[in-house]
């Protein structure tokens, strides 16, 4: 009986794949197959052991097409939108992964980075690692979120402007100030100055200051000028360090500091860009 149930689930999965789908819920499968929860879970567990099915979240399943058998899962863009709808959480693919999708390809991104309105645990799906970063004010940056076509539908990603701000807002995810500056060399020309100014009000002033300084340093001050005007409307800002980690290092003497009066940014060490 278990074999029959597993075969029926396998046939259901094959039908989904032939229709270009890789995801389904346990509730959906139970209804289609006419089985109870226990019987479905038993069959699903056996298919997971065979590495043809995975469950990144309770009640949500991803089929593994044959061409991705060695990976253990299809690419996250194939199912991230469906997963977040299952979670009932607004989201966008962001940070270094979004920068890569916008053409900033100085280095391979090892994580699939997602910004969400809820704190979510990371997901290991085959070779892929999906990491979630929390943002409570998702509605405030809606203008910086856009749809991107995938092989199975669409997913939401941050625009170049929102990506640039996030790289400074989530330094732990961006690989440090040197890496941020390197990524911005590719990303800056794609930033919409008006959009950047509009959504900059949703982030902390030091983040705006650091990004403005970097864009000026990289020769893209024109992209940052509307954002600077918006910052002045907010009442300006206090002095801030470009890299807060370096303010803790005793090796940096005061005479080594560079002070950017325009953005009120203190630079202890100029960023090193990977050519």
Image (tube, rainbow, N blue to C red):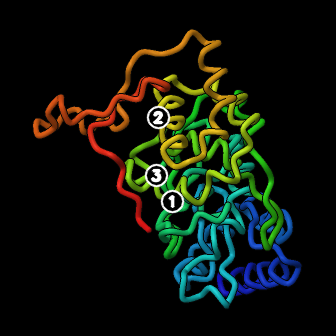
In this view, 202 is above or below 83: above
Q: Residue at x 62, y 85 (%)?
A: 68
| Front residue (pair 227, 162) | 227
In the displayed structure, does residue 236 sit left or right of residue 18? left
Question: Rounded to the nearest whole Å, what is the CA distance between mark 3 and mark 1?
Answer: 28 Å
Secondary structure of the residue carrying numbered label 1: strand
* Of callouts 2 and 1, the N-terminal one: 1
* Residue denoted by label 2: 210
* Of callouts 2 and 3, the N-terminal one: 3
In this view, 44 is above or below 235: below
Secondary structure of the residue carrying numbered label 3: helix
Q: Which mark is residue 181?
A: 3
Secondary structure of the residue carrying numbered label 2: helix
Residue 213 in the image: state x and y as whole percent.
48, 36
* Residue denoted by label 1: 123
Q: Nearer the viewer, mark 2 or mark 1?
A: 2
Question: Rounded to the nearest whole Å, what is the CA distance between mark 2 and mark 1?
Answer: 31 Å
Task: For label 2, count other residues whose C-alpha is less than 10 Å away and answer few (under 14), some (14-19) or many (20+).
Answer: many
Q: Nearer the viewer, mark 3 or mark 1?
A: 3
* Of callouts 3 and 1, the N-terminal one: 1
């Amino acid at each position: 009986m278990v074999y029959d149930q597993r075969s029926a689930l396998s046939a259901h999965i094959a039908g989904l794949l032939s229709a270009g789908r890789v995801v389904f819920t346990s509730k959906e499968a139970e209804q289609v197959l006419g089985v109870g929860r226990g019987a479905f879970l038993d069959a699903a567990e056996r298919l997971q052991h065979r590495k043809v099915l995975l469950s990144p979240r309770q009640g949500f399943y991803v089929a593994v097409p044959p061409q991705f058998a060695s990976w253990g899962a299809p690419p996250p863009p194939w199912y991230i939108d469906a997963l977040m709808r299952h979670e009932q959480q607004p989201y966008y693919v962001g940070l270094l992964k979004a920068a890569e999708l916008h053409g900033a390809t100085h280095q391979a991104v090892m994580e699939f980075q997602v910004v969400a309105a809820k704190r979510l645990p990371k997901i290991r799906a085959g070779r892929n690692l999906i990491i979630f970063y929390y943002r409570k004010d998702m509605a405030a940056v809606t203008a910086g979120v856009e749809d991107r076509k995938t092989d199975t539908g669409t997913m939401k990603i941050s625009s170049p402007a929102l990506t640039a701000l996030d790289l400074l807002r989530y330094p732990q995810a961006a690989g440090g100030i040197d890496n941020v500056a390197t990524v911005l060399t590719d990303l800056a020309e794609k930033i919409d100055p008006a959009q950047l100014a509009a959504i900059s009000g949703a982030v902390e002033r030091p983040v705006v200051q650091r990004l403005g300084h970097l864009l000026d340093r990289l020769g893209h001050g024109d992209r940052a000028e509307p954002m600077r005007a918006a910052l002045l409307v907010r009442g300006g800002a206090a002095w801030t360090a470009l890299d807060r980690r370096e303010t803790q290092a005793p090796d940096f003497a005061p005479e080594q500091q560079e002070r950017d009066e325009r953005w009120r940014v203190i630079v202890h060490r100029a960023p090193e860009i990977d050519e």
